Amino acid sequence: MIKPRLKSLFSGKEFKEILVRNKVKRIALFGSQVAENVHYPHDYDFLVEFQQGADLFDHVGLKQDLEEYLEKKVDVVTKNSLSKYLRNMVLKEAEYLDV
């Protein structure tokens, strides 16, 4: 479950502009930011589905823009880049954000 303090962070205009600029179709938060037993998460982990036509520059641009916006380290992964050992866990705990 996404913590209340994060909901406002991810519903703002600047966040939405970052997603549009980097051709994001869907984005989900997973890892320590959504884990209930972690009280001081250190980074943000995002599972992203890009729009058709997005390229490596959009992927890298999204990571850089989010790190600047959130002022923390950010990891951006796609379903295809997930390890087969972690895929089910990540997909199960991923909390999708409104785009």
Image: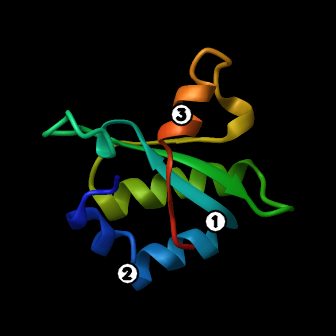
Marks 3 and 2: which is nearer the front? 3
Task: Report the Cα–Cα distance between label 2 and label 1.
Answer: 16 Å
Residue 56 x, y percent position in the rendering: 72, 47
Query: Helix, strand or loop at disc 2?
Result: loop
Instruction: Choose mark 2 or mark 1, whichever is in front.
Output: 2
Q: Quadrant of residue 14?
A: bottom left
**Amino acid bearing label 1:** Asn
Number of callouts in the render? 3
Residue furthest bottom in the image: 13
Q: Give me the residue at 33% from left, 56% from top.
A: 2
User: Few, some or many C-alpha atoms within 10 Å of disc 1 (few <14, some 14-19, many ≥20)?
Assistant: many
Callouts 3 and 2 close, C-beta under 8 Å: no
From this viewpoint, which residue is outermost toward the left? Answer: 39
Q: Nearer the viewer, residue 97 or 63?
A: 97
Residue beneath the point at 47% across and 40% down: 93
Query: Farthest residue toward the right?
Result: 53
Q: Quadrant of the C terminus?
A: bottom right
Q: Earlier in the sequence, mark 2 or mark 1?
A: 2
Asked if labels 1 and 2 touch by Cβ distance under 8 angstroms, the answer is: no
Disc 3 residue type (three-letter): Val
Q: Earlier in the sequence, mark 3 or mark 2?
A: 2
Work out how far the residue at label 3 is from the one at label 1, CA to CA, in angstroms: 22 Å
Which residue is more in the foreground, 26 or 71?
A: 26
Disc 3, disc 1: CB below 8 Å?
A: no
Q: Of the residues shown, which amino acid type is indicated by label 2? A: Gly
Q: How crowded is the residue under tag 2: few (<14 C-alpha within 10 Å), some, or many (20+)?
A: few
Q: Nearer the viewer, mark 3 or mark 1?
A: 3
Q: Is 10 placed above or below 81 here?
A: below
Instruction: Tell me which numbered mark, 3 or 1, is placed earlier along the sequence.
Output: 1
Residue at label 3? 90
Give the residue number, with chain letter if any, for mark 1. 22
Write down the residue under mark 2: 12
